[in-house]
Amino acid sequence: MHQARRLAGTELTQTERFALLALRHRNQLFRWERELMAPQTMQRLGALGLVAFEGNEWEPTLMGSELIARLSGHDLTSIALPDLMARLRGAST
């Protein structure tokens, strides 16, 4: 599970990839998904600029959201991250 994979120029382990993907549906996480989001995993994703700790929870950054989209095979508009999309729209105006 800890085999590193190279995606979008970032080395992520399988655990880190699954933890990042778990942010998409964090309201409906299985226990094993919550365990993937251990502090050390999320801190590493934070150090890579993929997530940020905001309001007592981890949120994907723009780069993290783009990577989630690539991992899941969807464009950004299909990801259930309304706060991020609102921020992106606000930044482009």
Image (cartoon, helix red, strand yellow):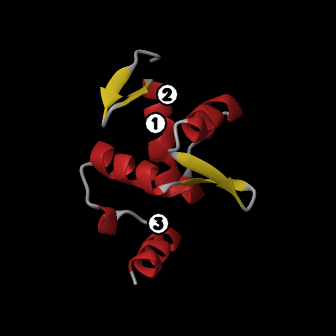
Q: Quadrant of the N terminus?
A: top left
Task: Tell me the amino acid under the disc marked 1.
Answer: Phe
SS at mark 3 in the image: loop
Tell me if mark 1 has few (under 14), some (14-19) or many (20+) residues whose alpha carbon lies within 10 angstroms of its own: some
Does the image show residue 37? no
Circle on res. 80: none
SS at mark 1 in the image: helix
Q: In x, y percent, where is residue 22?
A: 50, 46
**In the image, what residue occupies the spot 52% across and 51% down?**
23
Disc 3 from disc 2: Cα separation: 21 Å
Q: Quadrant of the C terminus?
A: bottom left
Q: In x, y percent, where is residue 49?
A: 52, 43
Left or right of residue 15: residue 8:
left
Residue identified by numbered label 3: 81
Left or right of residue 57: residue 92:
left
Tell me if mark 3 has few (under 14), some (14-19) or many (20+) residues whose alpha carbon lies within 10 angstroms of its own: some
Residue identified by numbered label 2: 15
Sequence-first tag of 1 and 3: 1
91 up-or-down from 54: above or below: below
Q: Please say if the residues under marks 2 and 1 sit with CB atoms less than 8 Å apart.
A: yes
SS at mark 2 in the image: helix
36 up-or-down from 5: above or below: below
Left or right of residue 27: residue 63:
left
Most foreground residue, 18 or 76: 76
Residue identified by numbered label 1: 18
Task: Tell me the amino acid under the disc marked 2.
Answer: Thr
Does the image show residue 66? yes
Q: Please say if the residues under marks 1 and 3 sit with CB atoms less than 8 Å apart.
A: no
Disc 1 from disc 3: Cα separation: 17 Å
**In the image, what residue occupies the spot 56% across and 43% down?**
30
Q: In x, y percent, where is residue 82?
A: 47, 73
Sequence-first tag of 3 and 2: 2
